[in-house]
Amino acid sequence: MAGLSLGALPHFIYQPIWVAIIFIAMIFWRIMAIRHLWPLPTKQLSAFKLIHLAIAGIAFVLLFISYGNFIGRDAGVALLTVMLSLKVVEIRHHRDYYISCFLGYFLVVTNFFYSQTIPTALLMFIVVIIMTASLISLNDSKKSLSNKGLIKLASSMLLQAIPLMLLLFVLFPRIAGPLWGLPQDAHSGKSGIDDSMTLGKISQLILSDEIAFRVKFNDQIPAQSQLYWRGPVLWQTDGTTWTELNKRYLMSSRPDFTTSGDEYSYTITLEPHNKRWLFALDFPGELPLTPASHYTYDGQLRSIKPINQRQKIRLRSYTQFNLNPKQDDAINNALQLPDKLHPRTRQLAQTWLQQSSQPAELINKALAYFNQNDFYYTLTPPVLTGDSIDRFLFESRRGFCEHYAASFTVLMRAADVPARIVTGYLGGEINPVDGFLVVRQRDAHAWVEVWLQDQGWIRIDPTAAVSPQRIDHGISTIMPEGFNTPLLMANSRQLIDLWQAIRNNWDAFDNAWNQWILAYGPELQKEFLQKIGMTKPDWQTMALWLAMGFVLMSLMISFYLFYHRPHYDPVSQLYSTFCKKAARAGCVRPKQQGPLDFATALKQHYPHLSQQIDHITELYINLHFGKQTVSVSDLRLAIKQFKFTASN
Amino acid sequence: MTQYLSQLYQRLNAVRRRRVFIIPTRFGFIYAGFLILILLGAINYSNSLGHILCFLLASMGWVAMHHSYRNVAKIELINGYANPVFAGQAINFNLLFENRCRRTSYQIELSSKPSKSRSWNLFKRLGGFAHNVTIAQLKAGATITVHCPVPSLRRGYQSLGQIRIASQFPLGLFNTWSYFTSDTKALVYPQPLGALALPLSKDSGDQITDPTQKGNDDFSGLNTYRSGDPLGSIAWKALARDDVLRIKQFTGYQGSQLMLSWDAVSQLADHEARLSQLCKWILQADEAGIDYGLSLPNTLVSYGYGDGHRHHCLSALALFDNE
């Protein structure tokens, strides 16, 4: 039952509160029944049976209200949790115990849909130990094992099972899922960059320490200010919300682009975000081998399928690029502004336009405007109501990257310069432990691209005009000191550094866990097996290796379980050295001969040693047959000093 | 070389003296089913931890199989004996088991089958075992005497026949069992039955009319103990006094002698009824403290008394005309 509770515990985070309440209530009922003989629902006690049924009924109604069905992933898990808790109260037979134990394992598995972290894995091991212990106690009807003994046996069984588990994990031929359609909500609840942007939305991400992806550069790492990880491109706006171009344009054709400048090859390990963007370093030179992906017309690298599991992507990017330099079919969308909105912004843009119609100058004017007026870069911008662009540019002037990107785009469009917003991530932190660049949700960023004839889309980051630190040194320099450290530690530099070191190590460990354990699928398996020397890792070879390993391990465990260490007591051992000495001297002791007879025989050969022989024999007999008047060391000494010397 | 091989063969033979059977239980199959479900789920969702849990549980099952085998494999039947009983009573076989493994065995269930059935049908041959007793635990290297009650069938020697030790320990996923064929025999006396009164015949020449009416409580003195004297007559208090075993002498029917003969029961219908009657008489005479003898067509037990004598007579009855 403890196992069941532990197995269910993590679910309470995701599930509605009533599931937890019912579960705890049922467990409580059962415990009270055991401890204080509370009545349980049985056929005889129909009142309690009714209560039980009523709870079940209420649970089902609540389930239906909460989820609308019983088929989805979340609903299924909630259903399992509730049913299991109801079953706990009903347990009567041997069989019921088994079934609840097995269902408990199931509950553990369902937990993995939500979380596959190291703590979850540890919890799994603990749950398995407890379940095993309860299975053992079921089969120990005479209760000859204490609780401690049960846990000990269960743990030792677990330890013995681990080698085979590893073998299976490595060698069991992996099949790429899914085998059947996944429920709609199979991969819900992932946070990250969205396909639309409303002012104030990205700054919510800033508070999230969650890892978006990790990058391993093959050789050198570009400068922080070059690390623009390209995500969704936003064109259309209604004044507050920015959205993507419609699908027709996105999919219409491959963009016309050329790349130049420094080349960087790297591997992104993308955390599942349930969207299609691959967040390549601006700008990717070619499509990756996996996953199947394509370029959108506005230069996004998008996977064909949503990324709903951790994905390794090998890419090559270039620092310079020309994107659609000749013409862009969607250019009208980059000039679109909502009617009658942002009058003051338009007015400002018009005054600039009257001074110069050169796009480059207009851009500089806008950047200078940000730079020279009292704009501040802040993670906690004031909430803007009404015409947010106008209010930001002329009133609050406190904003985050998205405020600058949006208002800059509006200014550009008002001045007839095609502009669009690109969202993604900027920068990242290098973990000194394993050299991976870790990009977190808080590195989310928005910048602008403007289209210039013959140059195509070029990147302008208006945030740089306000807060160059953000661009050059990453988000953490902007964050208040000790932002990510526990409160108590925030006061001491050393403690912050220590905390950072622990975090780095943990991240590296977590990364290794992700890279090797969680990502272990058909491809990684192949790669790994080739690395350890399997020339042709197809399923036949794997099965053969698996079978061999299995036999080997069976032998090992049998040996472990049955191996009988021959343990002699020290007295017999000492005596046998004496006998060996005698044998070397030519007197072999017959197997059945007693020590006294042997002594007599020896004395016949070595009459001059008879005193010592008698002494040793007497000591041996006294010790061996339980007279504790002499000590073992006496015998040891006597035998050590004894030598079969020929008589002179 | 050949000598070495034959030695090896003999040693292997000694190790494999006894077969141990193991099959999954109902729960074992359900467990396997659950594992397959978990595996399918893990594959479907490409869930690595799901794979790990599935493999872990499969390995646990495999470990449990070895433990289950180990739990039973090294239990040996060392010895067995049983006190004689009267037909109809349960024979209490005392079996000495030893755990020759260096680990403790738990929850060994012992069942027996009175005789080895020679059916060609495997299921019939494997079936028919009645559960007797459960050994809760047997420590490494320890021995245990198990009382295994078996119903007695008929007079004569009854051997224990086949016994089975089985266990589902530790997880209940596998049932492991093994058979012993023990030649331990128990002597079954005839059932003491019959309505005839004890034939206190004239030639035994005494004034006793009905010995069972009078108790043997007329204490007459103490005698030193001779082997065979009834334990119930030992003067324990006297023993505490001077460390000499004495038995209490009663003036019951001391000195009277009674020959229980086959002819005296010839009026009864068949052998078994006669033997039962004689059996009952022996018990009555023994209780009354009469010196009695037994004469059967091919056996003669002369006069005597005490537990040893009683056993002698009763076993003569038990084995009478028995092949």
Image (cartoon, helix red, strand yellow):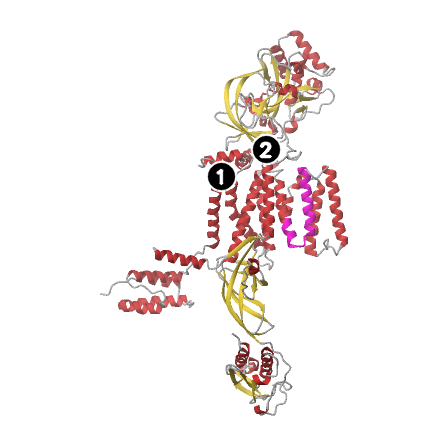
Q: Quadrant of the N terminus of chain B?
A: bottom left
The residue that disc 1 covers is A540
Q: Nearer the viewer, residue A357 or A421?
A: A421
Neighbor class of circle 2 (other Cα within 10 Å; few <14, some 14-19, many 20+) is: some
Residue extent of the magenta highlight: A72-100
Q: Amino acid at mark 2?
A: Gln
Q: Considering only vertical position in the picture, is A588 above or below B257? A: above
Which residue position holds label 2?
A309
The answer to whether residue A91 is magenta is: yes
Chain letter of mark 1 equals A
Q: Secondary structure at mark 1?
A: helix
Magenta span: helix, strand or loop, mainly? helix
Q: Could you tell me residue B105's position as x and y percent?
A: 53, 58
Whether residue B1 appears in magenta in the rendering, the answer is: no
**Which of pointers 1 and 2 indicates the residue nearer the eye?**
1
On the picture, is A49 further left or further right than A302?
Answer: right
Residue at 35% from the left image edge and 57% from the top image edge: B3
The reply to whether residue A156 is visible in this rendering is: no
Identity, as a three-letter code, of the amino acid under mark 1: Gln
Estimate the x, y position of residue A396 in percent, counting from the top left: 69, 21
Does residue A342 appear anywhere in the picture? yes
Nearest the eye: A39 or A448: A39
Displayed quadrant of residue A344? top right
Q: CA distance from mark 1 to mark 2?
A: 27 Å
Left/right of residue A633 with respect to residue B261 in the rendered view: left
- Same chain for labels 1 and 2? Say yes or no: yes
Q: Are marks 1 and 2 in contact (CB under 8 Å)?
A: no
| Chain of the residue under the numbered disc 2 shown in the image | A
Residue A369 vs A521, above or below: the answer is: above
